[in-house]
Image (cartoon, rainbow, N blue to C red):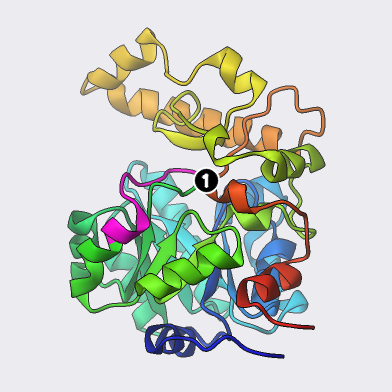
Amino acid sequence: MNDKILSPASQAFTQQLGIRYPIIGGPMYPCSNPELVAAVSEAGGIGIMQPISLTYVHGHKFRQGIRLMRQLTDKPIGMNALIEKSSKKYQKRMEEWIDVALEEGIRFFVTSLGKPNWVADRVHSVGGLVYHDVTELKWAEIGLANGADGLICVNSRAGGHAGAKDARVLLDELSGLNVPLVCAGGVGDSQEFDQVLGMGYAGCQLGTRFIASDECRASDIYKQSVIQAQESDIVLSERVTGIPVSVINTDYIKRSGLKYGWFAKWMLSGKKTKHWMRTFFALKSIWQLKKSSLDESGEKDYWQAGKSVAGINTIKSCDSIVKDLMKENY
């Protein structure tokens, strides 16, 4: 094989994580099934499990799900921790999941939506690493002040909850922090991969590209929609989560509209009612995104995807996807 020559930043990143290639298989609700996570790691990157996807969508008890992935690969895998303290019950469950993951040997964590200090304390005590999702300098500084070892830089081309800035602007804003920076958003083929590493990013996190993979359990109609979509087909919708989410502009999305209604707007404007509305959106999105991702009928096709769809035109194995990104020959 003819390995791509990596930059010093990318080499340091892969050595830090104990992986071959500077590629993260991003955590995706609802698409991160254990076979997909393990396949990305086995291919030489690192797959990140999403706990709610693992348990609620794909039906595994948390510890058993980790052990299944361990049967499929002996390479490093990671875990995503959504750490917003909006619910004491949810926070307790997340703490339990993190403790189980550490017991099962997981040593790389990606945190989102909060201060990662309590996660970092647990993870650092056993020699692990915490990277934190950020969209701008303010959140990056908060994450680093609370124990993050590196940053996942979510740009405006990402799927799911995208950032507002493009990859280069975000890199320029964060490059003085002297920690590993991983580009998240807009990478679907080897040309885009080369571009972001050439900018100076240490690695890339890909989500949408791995939806269109053999190992992903998303419906075939969802995968076909990903490979047929163009960048202009990606729009931001508020209607499921209450926060703009990047989705494919299907007929269902066109009929439903992109904005939530007057009642939700009124509820979100009140100090007491805001929490109730956000809880409703959270529960609704968990159910609807699960149903949409697995439903082969495409009746209510609410499919998350990023603008990297423009470079995705085939469904392949994770191993082939990683090798294509690295321009390796079999």
Looking at the image, which residue is at 46% across and 36% down? 245
Q: How many other residues sit within 10 Å of disc 1, few (<14), some (14-19) or many (≥20)?
A: many
| Res 247 quadrant in image | top right
Residue numbers of the magenta segment: 160-170
**Residue matched to label 1:** 307
Specify whether 77 is left or right of 174. Answer: right
Judging depth in this view, the residue of 56 and 29 nearest the camera is 29
Q: Is residue 164 magenta?
A: yes
The spot of residue 93 in percent (x, y) is 47, 54
Q: Is residue 12 left or right of residue 219?
A: left
Residue 220 on the magenta span: no
Identify which residue is drawn at 74% across, 64% down.
35
As displayed, is residue 95 above or below residue 253? below
Relative to 313, is 119 above or below? below
Question: Identity of the amino acid at label 1?
Answer: Lys
In the structure shown, which secondary structural element does the residue marked by tag 1 occupy?
helix
Classify the position of the C terminus by image quarter.
bottom right
**Which residue is drawn at the image coordinates 61% and 35% (left, top)?**
289
Residue 232 percent location from the top left of the image: 53, 35
Rendered image quadrant of residue 267:
top left
For residue 25, say whether it is visible: no
Side of 288 relative to 58 (left or right): left
Q: Please, is residue 265 above or below residue 302 in the view?
A: above
